[in-house]
């Protein structure tokens, strides 16, 4: 044998993997093994990308709009009191921004009905915190809101439920009441709808209303320009910890809420679901690797005569072992590459495909009342791809050890006698 054992083993492994006229069983089992690995890798890449997309949307989209921490009080404080609190908070380096706002619950009324909402009064400076909302406007903009003192911006779902559109008028009722000699009257005011947005989550689209801060102060009869502070952090996931620290920083009578109060359970469920689904999909990859063991065992059985001839020609058991190790690794490599290709292709177009399914079959895959968003996001991360490739190659290598050793233990005389 002129070639080195290493080259011979690699050459024969490639021959066994490739389709051959005389080895239909070998070719068929190789195709089955490659298909199983490709399918499992593609599903794993696709699902991990979708779960990463949910995590990204929670971090960048929803947490880019809602405040990370809200500081508020039920007392009607003077502006000097608020300035003292703001100056104290400004010394903390972990706070990215402090936005004075008017925040209160109220009722919005339109031609189609009434709904309870969370009213946010913002000004042009505080509106920088909500710049991420600009990407979700269907009509109008925040600039239109700043230009119209009695303008209002609402979510698309809320606009449909109360029967209004951009350019229409609606009525906002505040929780503050006017005392007169006859009967207490609720404060209310007619506003012009200057814009609508659609984020994709019910917490914002169905109950989020934005008006000018001055208009909100007049509607709720405040003594200062704000009744709440919206805080944004470097790390939104540290909101609970920082909120606990701020509890000792602010005067008595103030309340502190983090974004996790309303959205934390949803975010935790996404992270938990990602881990569970990833674990189950890795079990699927393990089943595909087990299928590779079965395929190689059948190939070894089919190639007993070839192995015996190689041994009689001087091939060592080590060389035979390398042949099937190479074959298993080649099957794993082909399956991984094909799986990555189709997985990346699916992850790239899964959002468009989901929208096409919803449009073609007139159904809704994700409900905003159940999930944080009502569309299927996707994000491909290089770290996940590296983990998938490494994990699949390791499982493939482990799966080839037993068949390769069994092939090396075949005795030439016994194998040729059975042939």
Image: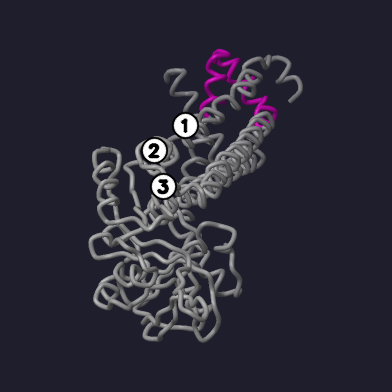
| Residues at circles 3 and 2 in contact by the CB criterion of under 8 Å | no
Range drawn in magenta: 299-326
Q: Compared to 152, does 128 lie above or below?
A: above
Q: Residue at x 45, y 69 (%)?
A: 176
Q: Secondary structure at mark 2?
A: helix
- Numbered tag placed on residue 372 in the rendering: none
Label 2, label 1: how far apart the Cα atoms are: 38 Å
Label 3, label 1: how far apart the Cα atoms are: 52 Å
Q: Residue at x 42, y 48 (%)?
A: 380
- Numbered tag placed on residue 390 in the rendering: 1
> Which residue in the protein does label 3 denote?
254
Q: Is residue 335 magenta?
A: no
Q: Is residue 310 magenta?
A: yes
Q: Compared to 100, does 337 lie above or below?
A: above
- Which numbered disc, 2 or 1, marks the residue that appears first in the sequence? 2
| Residues at circles 3 and 1 in contact by the CB criterion of under 8 Å | no
Q: Position of residue 405 (x, y in %)?
A: 62, 18
Residue situated furthest front in the rendering: 181
Q: Compared to 171, does 406 lie above or below?
A: above
Q: Position of residue 3 (x, y in %)?
A: 42, 20
Comparing labels 3 and 1, the label whose residue is closer to the camera: 3
Q: Residue at x 65, y 32 (%)?
A: 290
| 298 horizontally vs 388: left or right | right
Q: Secondary structure at mark 3?
A: strand
> Which residue in the protein does label 2 denote?
242
Dot 1, crowdedness within 10 Å: few (<14), some or many (≥20)? few
Comparing labels 3 and 2, the label whose residue is closer to the camera: 3
Q: Quadrant of the C terminus?
A: top right
- Which numbered disc, 3 or 2, marks the residue that appears first in the sequence? 2
């Amino acid at each position: 044998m002129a070639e080195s054992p290493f080259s011979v083993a690699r050459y024969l492994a490639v021959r066994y993997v490739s389709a051959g006229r005389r080895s239909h069983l070998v070719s068929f089992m190789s195709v089955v093994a490659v298909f199983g690995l490709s399918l499992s890798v593609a599903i794993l890449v696709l699902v991990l990308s979708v779960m990463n997309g949910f995590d990204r949307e929670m971090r960048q989209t929803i947490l880019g709009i809602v405040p990370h921490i809200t500081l508020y009080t039920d007392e009607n404080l003077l502006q000097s009191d608020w300035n003292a609190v703001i100056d104290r908070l400004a010394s903390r380096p972990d706070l990215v921004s402090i936005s004075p706002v008017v925040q209160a619950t109220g009722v919005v009324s339109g031609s189609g009905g009434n709904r309870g909402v969370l009213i946010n009064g913002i000004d042009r400076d505080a509106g920088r915190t909500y710049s991420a909302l600009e990407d979700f406007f269907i009509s109008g903009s925040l600039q239109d809101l700043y230009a119209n003192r009695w303008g209002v911006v609402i979510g698309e779902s809320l606009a449909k439920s109360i029967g209004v559109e951009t350019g229409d008028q609606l009525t906002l009722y505040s929780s503050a009441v006017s005392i007169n000699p006859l009967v207490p009257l609720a404060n209310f005011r007619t506003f012009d709808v200057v814009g609508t947005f659609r984020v994709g989550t019910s917490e914002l689209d169905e109950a989020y209303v934005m008006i000018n801060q001055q208009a909100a102060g007049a509607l709720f009869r405040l003594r200062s320009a704000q009744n709440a502070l919206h805080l944004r952090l470097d790390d939104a996931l540290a909101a609970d910890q920082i909120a606990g620290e701020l509890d000792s920083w602010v005067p008595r009578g103030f309340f502190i809420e983090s974004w996790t109060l309303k959205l934390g359970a949803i975010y935790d469920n996404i992270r938990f679901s990602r881990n569970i689904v990833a674990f189950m999909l890795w079990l699927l990859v393990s089943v595909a690797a087990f299928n590779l063991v079965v395929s190689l065992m059948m190939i070894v059985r089919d190639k007993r005569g070839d192995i015996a001839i190689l041994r009689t020609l001087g091939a060592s058991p080590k060389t035979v072992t390398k042949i099937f190790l190479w074959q298993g690794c080649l099957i794993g490599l082909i399956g991984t590459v094909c799986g990555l290709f189709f997985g990346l292709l699916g992850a790239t177009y899964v959002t468009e495909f989901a929208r096409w399914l919803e449009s073609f079959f007139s159904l809704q895959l994700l409900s905003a009342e159940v999930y944080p968003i009502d569309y299927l996001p996707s994000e491909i991360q290089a770290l996940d791809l590296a983990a998938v490739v490494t994990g699949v190659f390791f499982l493939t290598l482990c799966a080839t050890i037993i068949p390769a050793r069994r092939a090396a233990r075949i005795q030439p005389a016994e194998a040729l006698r059975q042939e």
